[in-house]
Structures are given as structure tokens and as C-alpha cells.
Image (spheres, helix red, strand yellow):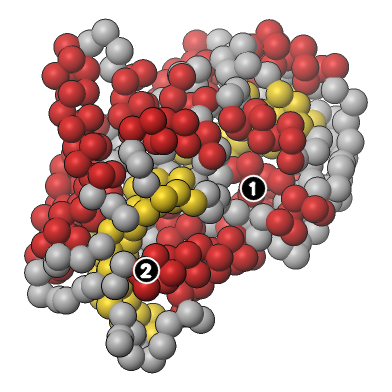
């Protein structure tokens, strides 16, 4: 019997973000696992993650004879809430229009903001088939922190909880990208769970990240989204106090970038350079020129459960990682990743003291890197997806 898979992901190659890298690797793993008569349709968006980095892509692209990508154009946005609602609404309704024209007997949805998962649930109901969810964040938990004490939160949170319950209860299996999510889910939903994390993409190795030229000041680099969740504007004032010893490079874009710019101007910080998002070839060169790699999450209870994908990417350089994280991410780093400097999120004094007390070194992470190859993780995840499909046929 041929299998007809529908994969929903708001992001897909050539977009630059964790969701895109994850889904792209998943589809690559699927290529080696399906038969010639099987079919996979991926419904995603045209590249849109960063307004300052947009690559061209085909609206409809055949990756192989039986794997097709449908990319939906969405309105231009700058990561604001209203912009995101408008953009997702376009993706939501146009996805349903495409799905109505095809038959599927399995729906897979990867989601960080709940609504791609909700869309997956509707598609599965529409096609009277089964749903497998890949959850990259607990949206209701995050919004509870961000909207705490507001009128919007009072109105919106109960609705989100209902949508979450309907969506997660409709799935036959849930994969959690972070084991830190499990305590939240197991109390609410009796499901089978798996924990296929993010990983290190083949683009990042083999590669020589050793720095060729020593500079008077060491370079601390952050690369990724610049949003409220990262809270970079809360710790960047430390750059001013550290200007004799360090330069900061911040690579990326996002909804809180203006706050970061305003903070840099307010504190008259002169040792921080902002870069717009770059492709992976250029990013590897910037990592090569760096001495430290910075990771930071805002001080919210929801972020104590997450496992940032940057941990995997940074680790391959074997350079020290400065981690402003707590909860599961801090536990994971301490247990699995050598050569890490930890501090409490938003605690500038602790950040500065721990950094200045650290004796610089490069440390091997061979074991972690070998166990964290995305190709291996996604291959195992596809095996799990196919086994779930067979179990519920």
C-alpha cells in the first residue's frame, strides 16, 4: 500500500531558522525511507523569516519524482504580532485550499507557535487520517509569561488553552524537541512521546574553526533571532563595561532588534557591531574569527523548559559558549557540552564576573558532536514516524 504523507512547516529551505533546518533535514531523511510509489507533499511559505534576508524560491518545487514542495507567498512582515497574525492567516487558509485537492493518509506538523499544529489537526480531520506532532515550543506557556497581568492575556489565554487541548488531544503521537517540555505535557495529555532534538547540520562540519589571527580584544558573537525571547537588550549594557577586553558581534534580526539598537545608543556602546542575517558560508567564517559564542534567553518560566537549537550549532566550533540560560538548557549544557560559561538570564554582573574569571581554552566536544549529527537524529525520527503510521493504519 502506498503512503501519502502531508508535512506542514511554516519554514523550509532556503529560509534561515531552526524550523527550516529541522524540516529540511527531515525531508532529506525521508528520501531514503520511502518507496517509489509513496508521495510526500510539503506545504510551507516563501522565504520570510527575516525581512533583511529573503532568498528566491519556486512556488512549487519537485525535490524528487514523489516529493513536492508548495510554497505559499505571505505578506511582508517585521515580526510584529499583527504582522505575524496576518502572515499566518494567509498560510492557514491557502494550505487548506491545497489540502482539499489531494488525498493523504498521514499528517505531520512541526510547530513552535501552536497554530501550525492546529492547522495540522484540521487537515487530519478533513482527510480523516492520523496526526503526528513535532513540538518545538510550548506556545501557551510562553504567552502566559509574556501576557501576564494584561487585558489581552485575560482574553486570549483561555482561548489558546482550548486550542491547545483540542490540537494535542487529536494527535496519535507527539515528539518534543526538548525533554524539558515533558513535565508540562504528561500532566495534561496521555500520549506516546519521543524526544528527537535538534542537531548539527552537515553544513557546519568538517570545517576548521581555529582562529588564524589573534586580536588585542577577544570577540564574543551572537547569531540568531533578536526577539523578546532572547532579551539581548537586557545584557548588552555589559559590553560597555567590558570594552577594554571584548568586542561583540550580533548577527541576526527580529522583533526586538530596535530595542537592542536603542540600548546601544543609550549606553553609548562602541564595541558592538550589528550584522544582518548571513548565509551559512559567511556565518562559518564569522564563527572562525570569533573567540566566544553567546547564547541568551529572557528570564521567563517558560524558557526554563526549552533547549535552544544554537547549542548544537555553537558546539561544533569547540569554542567556549557563554550561556545566559537556566532550567533544562543549563542542565543539558552542564551534562553534555564541555567548556561552557553559565550565568543567570539578564544578570549582567554575573555575566561580567564569570566571563572575566574564565581562563580561555578550546576544548574537544567530539563525543557530543558525534551523538548530535542531525542526519542521524532525523533518520531515527523518520523511522519512528513510519512505525507510528504502520501502527495506526
Q: Which type of secondary structure does the marked residue at label 1 adopt? A: helix
Q: Tags 2 and 1 in contact by the CB under 8 Å rule?
A: no
Q: Residue 391 has which mark? A: 2
**Image quarter (top left, top right, bottom left or bottom right) of the C terminus:** bottom left
For image coordinates 39% across by 65% down, the residue present is 388
Residue 199 placed where, x, y %?
A: 60, 54
Q: Which residue is mark 1?
A: 312
| Residue 64 vertical placement versus 353 (above, below) | below
Residue at the location (25% across, 37% down)? 164
Q: What residue is drawn where x is 78% and y is 41%?
A: 319
Classify 372 as above or below 166.
Answer: below
Using the image as rendered, state which of residue 234 and residue 343 is in the foreground: 343
Give how far across and how far down residue 351 sits, in percent: 69, 16
Crowd around label 2: few <14 · some 14–19 · many ≥20 (10 Å): few
Q: Closest to the observer: 201 or 170?
A: 170
Horizontal arrangement in the rendering, residue 268 relative to residue 71 (left or right): right
Q: Secondary structure at mark 2?
A: helix
Disc 2/disc 1 C-alpha distance (Å): 32 Å
Residue 13 visible to an observer of this rendering: no
Q: Quarter of the image containing the N terminus?
A: bottom left
Q: Residues within 10 Å of mark 1 (few under 14, many from 20)?
A: many
Circle number at residue 225 = none
Q: Quadrant of residue 131?
A: bottom left
Left or right placement of residue 112 versus residue 315 in this view: left
Is the residue 330 above or below the residue 34 in the image?
Answer: above
- Above or below, 261 against 129 in this view is above
Amino acid at each position: 500500500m502506498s503512503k501519502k504523507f502531508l508535512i506542514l512547516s511554516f519554514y523550509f529551505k532556503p529560509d534561515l531558522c531552526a524550523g527550516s533546518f529541522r524540516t529540511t533535514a527531515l525531508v532529506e531523511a525521508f528520501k531514503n525511507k520511502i518507496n517509489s510509489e509513496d508521495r510526500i507533499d510539503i506545504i510551507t511559505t516563501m522565504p520570510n523569516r527575516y525581512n533583511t534576508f529573503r532568498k528566491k524560491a519556486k512556488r512549487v518545487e519537485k525535490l524528487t519524482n514523489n516529493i513536492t514542495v508548495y510554497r505559499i507567498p505571505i505578506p511582508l512582515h517585521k515580526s510584529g504580532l499583527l504582522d505575524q497574525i496576518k502572515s499566518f492567516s494567509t498560510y492557514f487558509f491557502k494550505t487548506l485550499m491545497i489540502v482539499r485537492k489531494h488525498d493523504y493518509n498521514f499528517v505531520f506538523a512541526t510547530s513552535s507557535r501552536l497554530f501550525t499544529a492546529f492547522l495540522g489537526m484540521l487537515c487530519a480531520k478533513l482527510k480523516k487520517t492520523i496526526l503526528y506532532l513535532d513540538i518545538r515550543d510550548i506556545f501557551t506557556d510562553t504567552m502566559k509569561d509574556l501576557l501576564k497581568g494584561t487585558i489581552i492575556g485575560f482574553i486570549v489565554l483561555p482561548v489558546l488553552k482550548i486550542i491547545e487541548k483540542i490540537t494535542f488531544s487529536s494527535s496519535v503521537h507527539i515528539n518534543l524537541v526538548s525533554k524539558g517540555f515533558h513535565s508540562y505535557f504528561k500532566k495534561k495529555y496521555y500520549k506516546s512521546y519521543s524526544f528527537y532534538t535538534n542537531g548539527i547540520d552537515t553544513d557546519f562540519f568538517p570545517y576548521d574553526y581555529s582562529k588564524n589571527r589573534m586580536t588585542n580584544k577577544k570577540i564574543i558573537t551572537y547569531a540568531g533571532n533578536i526577539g523578546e525571547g532572547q532579551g539581548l537588550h537586557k545584557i548588552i549594557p555589559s559590553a560597555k563595561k567590558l570594552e577594554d577586553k571584548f568586542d561583540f558581534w550580533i548577527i541576526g534580526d527580529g522583533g526586538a532588534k530596535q530595542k537592542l539598537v536603542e540600548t546601544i545608543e543609550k549606553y553609548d556602546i562602541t564595541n558592538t557591531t550589528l550584522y544582518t542575517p548571513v548565509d551559512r558560508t559567511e556565518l562559518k567564517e564569522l564563527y572562525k574569527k570569533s573567540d566566544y559564542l553567546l547564547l541568551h534567553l529572557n528570564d521567563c518560566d517558560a524558557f526554563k523548559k526549552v533547549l535552544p537549537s544554537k547549542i548544537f550549532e555553537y558546539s561544533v566550533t569547540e569554542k567556549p559558549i557563554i550561556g545566559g540560560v537556566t532550567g533544562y538548557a543549563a542542565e543539558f549544557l552542564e551534562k553534555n557540552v564541555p567548556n561552557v560559561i553559565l550565568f543567570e538570564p539578564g544578570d549582567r554582573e554575573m555575566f561580567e564576573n564569570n566571563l572575566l574569571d574564565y581562563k580561555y581554552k578550546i576544548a574537544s566536544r567530539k563525543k557530543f558532536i558525534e551523538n548530535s549529527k542531525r542526519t542521524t537524529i532525523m533518520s531515527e525520527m523518520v523511522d519512528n514516524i513510519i512505525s507510528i503510521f504502520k501502527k495506526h493504519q
